[in-house]
Amino acid sequence: MIAESGHYALVLALGLALIQSVVPLIGARLHDTALMNVARSTALAQLLFVGASFMALVMLHVSSDFSVANVYENSHSMKPLLYKITGVWGNHEGSMLLWVSILALFGGLVAAFGNNLPLSLRAHVLSVQGWIASAFYLFILMTSNPFLRITSPPLEGRDLNPVLQDIGLAVHPPMLYLGYVGFSISFSFAIAALMEGRIDAAWARWVRPWTLVAWIFLTLGIAMGSYWAYYELGWGGWWFWDPVENASLMPWLAGTALLHSALVMEKRNALKVWTILLSILTFSLSLLGTFLVRSGVITSVHAFATDPTRGVFILLILCLFIGGSLALFAGRATSLKQGGLFAPISREGALVLNNLLLTVACAVVLFGTLYPLAMEMLADFKMSVGAPFYNLTFAPLFALLLFAVPFGPMLAWKRGDLLGVTQRLLAAGVASLVAIAIAWAWARGGSALAPLAIGLGVFVIAGAVTDIVERTGLVRLPFATVLNRARGLPRSAWGTTLAHAGLGVALIGIVCETTWNSEYIATMKQSDVAHVAGYDVKLDRLFQRQGPNYREMIAEFNVSRDGETLSMMTPSKRSFTTRGSSTTEAALLTRGASQLYVSLGDATAEGAIAVRIYYKPMVLLIWWGPVLMAFGGVLSLSDRRLRVGAPKPARAKQRLQPAE
Amino acid sequence: MRRMWFVIVALMLLASPAAHAVQPDEIMSDPVKEARARELSRELRCMVCQNQSIDDSDAPLARDLRLLVRERIAAGDSNSQVLDFLVARYGEFVLLKPRFERQTLLLWLLAPLLLAGGGLALWLQIRRRARSGADLPAPPLTPEEEARLAGLMSDDAKSQ
């Protein structure tokens, strides 16, 4: 019954989405308020039904109903409850259901909090959301139905892939989807603006918080995925330039560009056409990411999910939406009026440079991901594009961008004074030079570029801090005044500083980890001692243990430094009986921002075991950076001007309030 | 969702429990040569994996390739000779850093071309705008906005 109800709710959601895609548009043409308001109720009802459908799938997984194919294939009665729930989206069908649920959630939020939007704009936006939703409901119902029954139900399920039975991977997909799908809102706003032929600063103020929300989730989602790969895959790598990773990086790059160009549009009424185009491109890249991950097109001898009907269906959706929106853009963009002149050296100019570099970086990733596919199909030439390529192309672009970051926020709008800003950044420059000198003197081996990159990171952080120092008058004003000023600064200023500083923090982490990490690989027997970066790691004992749905082999290491015992580390290797596969659970010892990393290989017959030990200096900065960036985003979002659905002051009830 | 796929595939492929990248028994006794081997390994693709270098990969094929690289180095090959040897055997698919040649021209030149093109377009636009003169006038208000503005003004008047 639950499965059938869930299926039925999904069909009803499709019906509602179809109504939502057509009726409000007719209403907008006829200037009929009632018809336009249909968008609001259908969006909310749709959320209700998709929510019900999703809950139904969760209930099926929790109750281990193996008569449902999806549950049988991805669950096991002995699996811990947490992973029964997260297993819902640990497979193709379930993750697509999560995708549409989040889409409906965003649509519902616009419907619920969009009361201060012009009525016809809201109708258009929700209607575009309806198109996207309809396409994906059809996709799920026709090719990836999670509610299919098995005629003769088996007694036990096949268990979720062990690698996915991990808290990191449990939270990673929803975060990423909140990011991916969140960009659908800015896409819908862009299409609505093109259809209405009207766009103004108020539009940008409406779009920015939604873009920011999506960007925050995407940032955290990518960082979390990267940290998961780091501790779970057993060799301490954290970014692989893999097509699936690139699929999430591209919308992030485009979305970051969009955040900045929307800023110019809101403040200065310039870059309108470009902002619209970026909104379209960002969501198109999200769709492309979904296509790459879900269709199995990625070059690989044994691509997953090799069912071609799914791939072709998503490809159709992709072509329809990207082609359609770009055609609409080509036809209507010229009708949008350009405003707001600015000199090349100005805040606007800096943001244009930011956009140029981010888009080119995004294009490099896009080409790197798709070029091998295209060459194989068109020229029958098999090639690979991997990390060494991106290190040579993407890295210099980002270095250039990072160098420009401290200048941007300090330049004035309209016409800036580059020389003046350079003088104001003198302290940051000196800090950076000192950092280069220290890194140079301290470094043993490694690339000569590394100290320079450290200096760049310090420059970005110091530059971001300089802005706040200047605006609060720290150093030159009495402390009480500074405190007052700091309190008076808009939260978005703090947000900018934190987000920019986060970039520098991440860069320092990346450089330190890749340049100065130490490695020890050997077969160890009981009471063998490994010496890594000043730490003595002694293998105390090896033993077996039974977990809920796996057996694990655990090694106990005693870690000491200069004879003083610091901690015990217990990496393990789990073998999951149902799937006959195993996972490595690395042990991590955190010292400041650095980590000692121990993971196990295969055991030999003589009771010895292959061990890999790494010392990774400053490695945690790689993820603290994005967390800082996301926190900056949250601060900026909490700024009164941008707050989503901010409570209005009583007196301002009838005031023109387009942006909140 | 990201990394799991190749892991699934790798795990399915390996009937035996997953081994790790570089195994203790593979390491060369000469640290300089071993460093060269590691450096080369990072530029070589494990052909049955999804975009992993043989330095990272668990697959048996990656192990074979790692041993092959070390064999060649031990035989006295230079880095480029080792790469040539592998390309002759497995095609350019094995290189994670594609060579600069006819087929990859566009890939390598994309970033500089886009930067130059974008920069040129911006420069032209700035020049055109500078000639066209002052700010364009703000677009006129729609009747709906006029009405809201009127309401707003009267509201302000009342409250004062």
Image: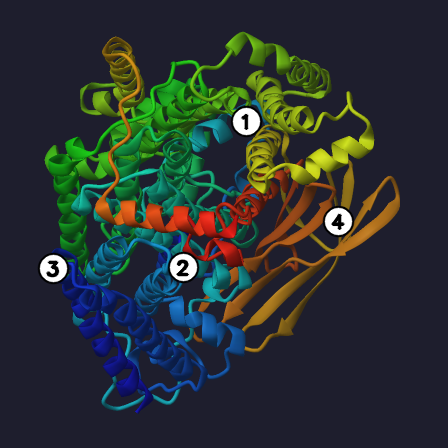
User: In 3D space, how far apart are the residues under numbered discs 3 and 4 (Cα atoms)?
Assistant: 82 Å
Q: Position of residue A436 (x, y in %)?
A: 66, 16
Distance from disc 2 to disc 4, alpha carbons, whole Å, reads 30 Å
Percent across and percent down for residue A510 are 56, 33
Q: Amino acid at mark 3?
A: Leu
Q: Nearer the viewer, mark 2 or mark 4?
A: 2
Q: Which disc number belongs to residue B35?
A: 1
Which residue appears at 15% of the width and 66% of the height? A23
Check if mark 4 and mark 1 are on a common chain: no
Label 2 Cα crowd, 10 Å radius (few <14 / some 14-19 / many 20+): many
- Work out how far the residue at label 2 is from the one at label 3, CA to CA, in angstroms: 59 Å
Residue receiving disc 4: A528
* Mark 3, other Cα within 10 Å: few <14 / some 14–19 / many ≥20: few
Disc 2: which residue: B11
Secondary element at image label 3: helix
Q: Identify the image quadrant of residue A386.
A: top left
Are dots 3 and 1 in contact, CB under 8 Å? no
> Where does label 3 land, which residue?
A30
Asked if labels 2 and 3 share a chain, the reply is: no
Amino acid on which disc 1 is placed: Ala
Decide: few, some or many residues near mark 1? Use Cα within 10 Å; few <14, some 14-19, many ≥20. Answer: few
Q: Chain of mark 2?
A: B
> Do tags 3 and 4 sit on the same chain?
yes
Rounded to the nearest angstrom, the CA distance separating label 3 from label 1 is 73 Å
**Residue A497 percent location from the top left of the image:** 59, 33
Q: Pick the residue in front: A8 or A107.
A: A107
Q: CA distance from mark 4 to mark 1?
A: 25 Å
